[in-house]
Amino acid sequence: MCGIVGVSHHKEASKIAFLGLYALQHRGEEAAGIVSYDGHDTHVLKKSGLAVDNFDEEGIRRLTGHMAIAHTRYSTTGSSNTKNIQPILVSHRRKPIAVAHNGNLTNTEELYSKLENEGSIFQTSMDSEIFVHLLAKTPNGDMAQWLIKAFSQVQGAYSLVLLLEDYLIGARDPQGFRPLCLGKLGDGYILASEGCAFDMMKAEFVREIAPGEIVIIKGNKVESVYLPEASKKANAFCVFENIYFARPDSRIFNDNIYQVRKRLGQQLAIEHPAKADFVMGIPDSGNYAALGYAQQLGLPFEMAIVRNHYIGRTFIQPTQFLREFRVRVKLNPIRDVIKGKKVVVIEDSIVRGTTSRSRIDEIREAGAKEIHMRISCPPIISPCFYGIDFPSKGELIAHNKTVKEIADFIKVDSLKFLSLEGMLSVMKEKGSFCSACFTGKYPTQIPKNTDKLKLEI
Ligand code: 5GP
Ligand code: MG
């Protein structure tokens, strides 16, 4: 997954873009980048790791200009190689084009072969690079027609921001898989994956970009054009953004995520009540549904696991002892609260089942008498081709295990999942969601080659 930001007509555009990355850091922790434009030149800063840790003031100060776009990356196509850090910046007819993309395309193989046969040379192994090649190949007279012609060739999930000289462009695919929001700051406009970015910038939330809409922003003018496909295809907003991915203080898909998650918890309580001394969530993602669950049943809600916020990055884990230490230091159950109690543990989702198993182990070690686990979405049985890093079927625990078998693996006294109908019933935009990861029914053709590293040389 990824987070994207675009800033137009602000004298400190790159600083504002950096604030956006700060707010959207949860959408991708592998790498981040900012490209700015000052009317003559472009300036680039790209780093592996977290933007919040690795970008310094001096680096950002050098990114002069009134326009900027930014990206924070969680790789779903291509490896974590440094050449794969976005935004992608190219020069086309001596003018800069930069793009930052969130989502996965589904006709990458076909477009890649076609473009290579026509002479394109790719510099990255990301499907996102296809956008700049398509723009370069499409005759560019009228701006709106140029963008429509180029984007119409792409299938799958994309929310993107483009910097085309003095123009800031935002686009969302015709089914609207990924979010994209428009904000206003001073005389200029901002684009960001989630509304929480505007709060940090003190920008005003204007609205969401519609599925299939392309906004062309220049100065204080915003013009919208629409991809013809938009009127033919049903919306397919990613329901997992609501369940886990987006920040609770964001407003996307016409709803506030905190409230959506509480409603998921309430619905879970209606479908699968449990008798217990109290309800607890697995921090942070399980807490919101846990609160809704507890309120619905009139049970006490306890913050019985403490999250340590000073935990370092995960990749240096040389020994088993250090790995276990890391798990423990991140989330520590409070023995005095849990000991001898019957507890309901709420988690937002189970993917592989491995973290859930170790959390439950720790809650048991802290002395819980009974553990009833409740999950605020249905079992995940199919991979995502639109940008969530759900692995191959084989790695998804619910793909070939029954709920009873999963309960035995995680070692809980009972385990229940929210129903598909129950989950969809609490969403505001009825009939607008993609829930393929729970059903295996995909709203587009699925890609021929689903290997994440398919474009690797
Ligand atoms: P599992 O028990 O399946 O190993 O892990 C479930 C946990 O992973 C839940 O706490 C859920 O919030 C979290 N999770 C779900 N999707 C993702 C994801 O795409 N990335 C990360 N890092 N965590 C996820
Ligand atoms: Mg979690």
Image (tube, helix red, strand yellow):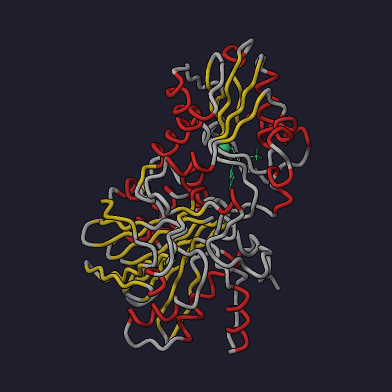
Residue 319 in view in this figure = yes
Q: Which sits in the foreground, 186 or 256?
A: 256
Question: Dividing the image into 4 quarters, which one contains the N terminus?
Answer: bottom right
Residue toward you, 225 or 122: 225
In the image, what residue occupies the spot 32% across and 85% down? Answer: 142
In the rendered image, residue 160, in percent from the top left (x then y), is placed at 43, 65
Q: Position of residue 392 (x, y in %)?
A: 69, 55
Q: Is residue 290 visible?
A: no
Residue 81 quadrant? bottom right
> Percent from the top left, x then y, of residue 235?
43, 59
In the image, residue 305 above or below residue 216 = above
In the image, 202: left or right of 344? left
Q: On screen, 267 above or below 25? A: above
- On the image, which quarter does residue 363 sit in? top right
Q: Residue at x 25, y 68 (%)?
A: 222
Residue at point 42% right, 47% down? Answer: 23
